[in-house]
Amino acid sequence: MKFVDEYRGAAPTRKLAAAIARRVTRPWTIMEICGGQTHSIVKFGLDELLPPAITLVHGPGCPVCVTPVELIDAAVALAARPGTTVCSFGDMLRVPGTGADLLTARARGGDVRMVYSPLDAVNLAAQSPAREVVFFAVGFETTAPANALAAVQARRLGLRNFSLLVSHVLVPPAIEAILSAPDNRVQGFLAAGHVCTVMGTTEYAPLAARFGVPIVVTGFEPVDILRGVLACVEQLESGRAEVANAYARAVRPQGNVHAQRVMQEVFTVVDRNWRGIGRIPSSGFALRPEFAEFDAARRFGVANDVPPEATECISGLIMRGAKKPQECPAFGVRCTPEHPVGAPMVSSEGACAAYYRYRLRKTPAAASTAIP
């Protein structure tokens, strides 16, 4: 497939790994901040191709994983409400709250539906005026434009039975929180190409300058990721800390200004609680007052109390890059994709799910995905 297969070739991948090995002279720790990148790294064994001096750690790049427990509980409670339909993307259905997930809510009689677009939920509300339809709006800046358009479309149609339960989070404040932590060991970042396709690259420059860390925007295939690692190592070895774009085929410095415009029309920046990490200032989106009529939290009086999480889950340490999934005592034993303890094992983008699938049991099928 054009623009995919040519970025998965064994020869260019190994060539980049060799270039990194020639350039590195001391240990460096680099964090990718996208769940899709994490899965590619583990699936293709990219970390195992790198020299021992390079350590790749995994950040809070899975939006499902960082969705706070209280909003999962709110979605479950809304699903149990008579006359209410909760719509969500499929990877949210099995994320555990304090007592249940959305699949359990559906098994108990709640109306929970998987959709492929927020506009599917808008259309459902238009077709079912007697029901309240709530779309669980989760994600980073990547999914925010489509969710914003859903609110715009609902207002255009004059819908009074559609609302959004918003749990959007933003990448730059998360990077700042990681770098500000006293136990931080991250010295460089691989930024998510799809987020930067929307937002551009300029908002990362103050972080690179303030903390003295290179931030390299990259894609999701093996060649993309190792190009990003090489660009990051080049900066680290030469003592530079800049924003670099190793994904120029998709990312422009200004990003997608039309998407940004609709986001600014619908959303405002607020403090947000991140599952496993805690509250990060100015790290999320909420609906602007002009769109308050579509705010499910306001409409249904959703509680903001933060419940306790599973004590044996170390997802916070994993998403801050302090530990790897296999260092969790529950990993692969009490926490599996069939019976997850924490969100990183549930989501298809979660680091724990990636390690469970590609590292815990190296089946022939899994092994065949590695770079030969």
Image: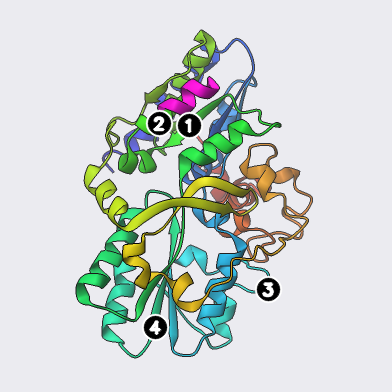
Mark 1: which secondary structure?
Answer: strand
Q: Which residues are magenta?
A: 205-214
In the rendered structure, are the residues bearing label 1 and label 3 in contact, judged by CB atoms less than 8 Å apart?
A: no
Q: Is residue 171 above or below residue 310?
A: above
Q: Amino acid at mark 3?
A: Gly
Disc 1 residue type?
Leu
Nearest the viewer among 220 and 212 is 212
Q: Amino acid at mark 2?
A: Val
Residue 314 visible at all: yes
- For disc 3, the marked residue is 99
Please give the residue where the numbered disc 4 appears in the rendered image: 132
Calculate the distance from the C-alpha at mark 4 to the C-alpha at mark 3: 24 Å
Q: Earlier in the sequence, mark 2 or mark 4?
A: 4
**Toward the viewer: 211 or 304?**
304
- Crowding at label 4, few (<14), some or many (≥20) Cα neighbours within 10 Å? many
How many angstroms separate mark 1 from mark 4 (CA)?
A: 41 Å
- Which secondary structure class fits the magenta region best? helix
Indicate whether residue 152 is drawn in magenta: no
Name the residue at the front extreme: 289
Task: Give me the C-alpha separation between circle 2 and circle 1.
Answer: 6 Å
Q: Label 1 belongs to which residue?
A: 190
Residue bearing the label numbered 2: 217
Q: Earlier in the sequence, mark 2 or mark 3?
A: 3
Label 1 vs 4, first from the N-terminus: 4
Q: Is 245 on the left-hand or right-hand side of 188?
A: left
